[in-house]
Amino acid sequence: MPYYASRAYRIGSGVFGAFLFAVGIAVLYFAFLDGGYGWIVGPAVAVLGLNFVWSAILGTEPWFSRIGPLP
């Protein structure tokens, strides 16, 4: 069984994805109030969070884990 299909990883990535989605929505909200680069960053973070949640539901590998090992 791959690591991303385990129950603990799915729960953890689902919770982290929900957090990222909330952060993305908050960035969009404050970008609406203040302006700036929030219009670019907010949707990107929200989509990444939704992908984490969707991957946790389906038991597949999220996009973020496919970028390779980071230093």
Image (cartoon, rainbow, N blue to C red):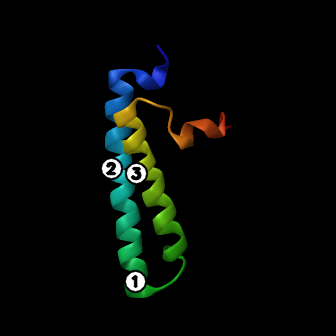
Residue at image coords 42%, 51%: 49
- The residue tagged 2 is 18
Which of the image's four quarters has the C terminus?
top right
- The residue tagged 3 is 50
The reply to whether the C-beta atoms of the residues labelled 3 and 2 are less than 8 Å apart is no
Residue at image coords 43%, 79%: 31
Residue 21, image quadrant = bottom left
Residue 52, image quadrant = top left
Q: Is residue 12 above or below residue 34?
A: above
The reply to whether the C-beta atoms of the residues labelled 3 and 1 are less than 8 Å apart is no
Numbered-mark total: 3
- The residue tagged 1 is 32
In the rendered image, residue 41, in percent from the top left (x then y), is placed at 52, 67
Q: Is residue 48 above or below residue 43?
A: above
Question: What's the residue type where badge 1 is placed?
Answer: Phe
Q: Is residue 71 left or right of residue 55?
A: right
Cα gap from disc 3 to disc 1, whole angstroms: 21 Å
Task: Work out whether mark 3 precedes mark 1 in sequence or the reverse, and give the earlier one.
Answer: 1
Residue 40, image quadrant = bottom right
Residue at image coords 48%, 52%: 48
Numbered badge on residue 7: none
Mark whose residue sits in front, 3 or 2:
3
Q: Secondary structure at mark 1?
A: helix
Question: What's the residue type where badge 3 is placed?
Answer: Leu
Q: Is residue 40 left or right of residue 26?
A: right
Cα gap from disc 3 to disc 2, whole angstroms: 7 Å
